[in-house]
């Protein structure tokens, strides 16, 4: 949907215009000044075409099922603190995102989970500035998220693909990023780290399962709610361990091959519109 929106914006907008994407569960909070929040974001990218920006998002935006499971466990044990700090490798997300239309010519949004961060990572690798506009504050409307193994598998595919790009950007020079992403050994390292991360969560949850059950029995409460979540986490970890890194590397390569067609398509679409 985001890629289609970029095509439409290129057809009806000027050569250098602003594009703002906002999810239907995001509400912009009253602005401190008498200036529109969207106007603030759009002016930023018109002044700096190499800037991708968005507002500060409150609530639980971009929360994966793994993070939802952790938050639910925290509630069961009566802790207000998160067992693991939420990962925020990108300061902004697709929930509220503004950029110059000239940026859209480079990459389409990938068709996997975490597509917004993966898209932003491509621009970060090319030296674009990704920055949150702190004068703009928005909130995600709360909604119940049901945990399922099917959803968690899909999300972990996208997490692995994003982490591969993100880690390359963080750990290598700009000229070496592409080389790392063409290395099977690199993808194997990324997949191994994802399994280690999930194992850490499982070990922590397993350690608190019995004490929590005993405490609730003393209070006359039935069940802990932790066991089914723990079972889901274990199944998810087993799935991630079964992912073939070479398949993920090829999937990312296919995305890059599609980038060439994307750029040709946008050029052709613009020519047709001009005619």
Image (cartoon, grey):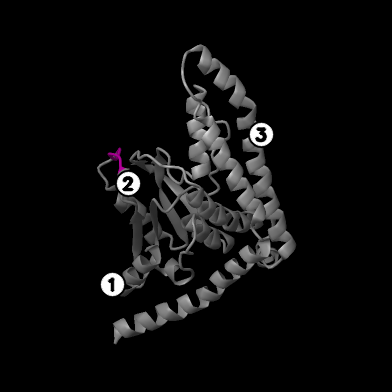
Query: Which one is in front in this view, the residue at disc 2 or the one at disc 3?
Result: 3
Between marks 2 and 3, how big is the CA–CA gap?
34 Å
**Label 2 Cα neighbours within 10 Å, binned few <14 / some 14-19 / many ≥20:** few
Residue position marked by numbered label 2 in the rendering:
25
Query: What is the secondary structure assignment of the residue under circle 1?
Result: helix
Q: For the N terminus, which image quadrant?
A: bottom left
Q: Are marks 2 and 3 in contact (CB under 8 Å)?
A: no
Task: Choose between 274 and 149: the one closer to the eye.
Answer: 149
Left or right of 86: which side holds 246?
Answer: right
In the foreground, 178 or 135: 178
Using the rendered view, name the quadrant where residue 256 is placed: bottom right
In the depicted structure, whether residue 75 falls above or below residue 20: above
- Helix, strand or loop for the magenta stretch, by majority: loop
Q: Which quadrant holds residue 45?
A: bottom left
Residue 128 makes an appearance in the image = no
Return the disc, 2 or 1, that comes first in the chain's sequence: 1
The magenta segment is 28-32
Q: Residue at x 47, y 46 (%)?
A: 148
Mark number for residue 203? Answer: 3
Measured in 3D between alpha carbons, the distance from the residue under mark 1 to the one under mark 3, in whole angstroms, is: 53 Å
**Where does label 1 land, which residue?**
12
Residue 241 at what x, y percent from top left?
Answer: 66, 52
Residue 220 lies in the magenta-colored region: no
Instruction: Say above or below: 175 vs 204.
Output: below
């Amino acid at each position: 949907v985001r890629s289609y929106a970029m095509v439409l914006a290129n057809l009806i907008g000027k050569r250098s215009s602003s594009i703002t994407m906002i999810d239907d569960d995001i509400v912009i909070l009253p602005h401190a000044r008498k200036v529109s929040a969207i106007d603030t974001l759009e002016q930023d990218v018109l002044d700096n075409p190499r800037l991708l920006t968005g507002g500060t998002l409150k609530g639980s935006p971009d929360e994966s099922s793994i993070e939802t499971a952790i938050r639910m466990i925290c509630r069961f044990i009566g802790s207000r603190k998160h067992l693991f700090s939420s990962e925020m490798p990108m300061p902004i997300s697709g929930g509220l995102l503004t950029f110059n239309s000239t940026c859209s010519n480079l990459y389409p949004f990938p068709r996997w989970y975490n597509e917004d961060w993966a898209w932003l990572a491509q621009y970060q690798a090319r030296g674009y500035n990704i920055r949150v506009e702190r004068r703009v504050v928005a909130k995600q409307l709360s909604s119940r998220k049901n945990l399922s193994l099917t959803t968690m598998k899909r999300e972990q595919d996208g997490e692995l693909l994003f982490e591969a790009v993100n880690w390359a950007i963080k750990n290598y020079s700009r000229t070496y990023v592409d080389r790392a992403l063409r290395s099977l050994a690199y993808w194997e390292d990324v997949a191994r780290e994802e399994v280690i991360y999930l194992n850490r969560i499982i070990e922590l949850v397993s350690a608190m399962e019995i004490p929590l059950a005993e405490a609730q029995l003393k209070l006359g409460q039935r069940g802990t709610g932790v066991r089914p979540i723990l079972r889901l986490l274990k199944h998810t970890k087993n799935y991630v361990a079964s992912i073939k890194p070479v398949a993920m590397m090829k999937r990312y390569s296919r995305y890059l091959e599609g980038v060439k067609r994307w750029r040709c398509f946008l050029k052709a679409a613009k020519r047709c519109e001009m005619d």
